[in-house]
Amino acid sequence: MRSPKDFFAPLALGAPAPLREIPFRPSRMIHFFDPSNERMRAKVPDIAPTVDVLLGNLEDAVSAGSKDAARAGLIEVGKAWERGHTQLWTRVNSLDSPWFLDDVWALCHEIGDKLDVIMVPKVEGPEDIHYVDRLLAQLEARVGIEQPLLVHAILETARGVANVESICLASPRMQGLSLGPADLAADRRMKTTRVGGGHPGYLVRTDPAPDGDAGDDARTAFQQDLWHYTLARMVDACGTAGILPYYGPFGDIADPIGCEDQFRNAYLLGCVGAWSLHPSQIAIAKRVFSPEPAEVAWAQRVVTEMGDGTGAVMIDGKMQDDATVKQCRVVLQLARDLSAADPELAAAYGLETA
Ligand code: GLV
Ligand code: MG
């Protein structure tokens, strides 16, 4: 048993006090790069200003033989990093791997004051977060890191999905969750070999004609979203904990339309961003996770016409009341938060930047 009062006490003597609110910082795209690759490291100064989050990936997609080089490469990038609008994140190896402890130890010692968020893969339950929470507090205290490191969990096992609420609520360090559709598909024994996105076999079909004459060709089939259930659970769990949900990777780089559709479904459901695995996905995420100027203008109109936000009015034949004004405030707040770092977007929305 633990007193709620202790929840915000540091878990190690000398560690910084945990944050009480997770700050909303634009993170429409979490752009992955492999720090073991010298060519990719050389591109960091050009790519960093074009993304909200740059993530040095140490886990899957980095071969076992390159793990040390990836860690060292990220440290090199972190040492040259100047904190600004773009955040620097990492995805460390999983808790059961031979690399996790060295990853966290080295990163905290070398660039613990530059990293914003540590993404932890294959989180299965709150006990995983408790372990990471205490370890980070010990390292923060040991190294003298002043700003608490935040933790982002990837939801990519069946047990993780079953425990999603308690994962989100396990620590004040929890910043958000991403869906990991590839590992999750494998763990659940789903029969898709794709990294996220739809599947042409996952359908519902209209009924046969009563007389059977029209044949099966007349029956329309609609493809369904394989990830809807998990994303919706994630969004509710994150909302309950006051943290941020993200769609994860879309692996078919050659299918920008499919990628945009998947990202947009996640945006409409409540996610704030997605991963970009290739530079071509940066613009897609930026477009999808920034509200449309017409939507922002509409939201502004509703908020203005609703005055103190109570009662009901009709605007262009559509009923507005206390609830719709709240929906519009969500869109407006997002537009303001994104505009603060993006004068072009601020101009498109007609909003003043500070
Ligand atoms: C991402 O890590 C995934 O497994 O999809
Ligand atoms: Mg994975």
Image: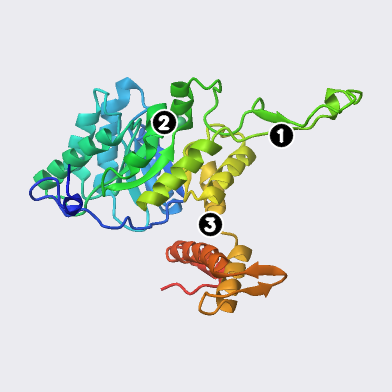
Say few, some or many: other residues with alpha carbon within 10 Å of mark 3 (under 14 / 14 to 19 / 20 or more).
many
Amino acid type, callout 3: Ser
Disc marking residue 290: 3
Amino acid type, callout 1: Phe
**Ligand 2 rendered quadrant:** top left
Q: CA distance from mark 1 to mark 2?
A: 26 Å
Depth check: 74 or 180 in front?
Answer: 180
Q: CA distance from mark 3 to mark 2?
A: 26 Å
Q: Residue at x 52, y 29 (%)?
A: 195
**Percent from the top left, x then y, of residue 162?**
40, 32
**Which badge, 3 or 1, comes first in the chain's sequence?**
1
**Percent from the top left, x then y, of residue 44?**
38, 45
Q: Residue at x 58, y 39 (%)?
A: 259
**Left or right relative to 254: residue 129:** left
Mark 3 or mark 1, whichever is nearer to me: 1
Q: CA distance from mark 3 to mark 1?
A: 28 Å
Amino acid type, callout 2: Glu
**Percent from the top left, x then y, of residue 248?**
46, 38
**Which badge, 3 or 2, comes first in the chain's sequence?**
2
**Which badge, 1 or 2, comes first in the chain's sequence?**
2
Disc marking residue 222: 1
Q: Quadrant of residue 246?
A: top left
Depth check: 54 or 195 in front?
Answer: 195
Disc marking residue 156: 2
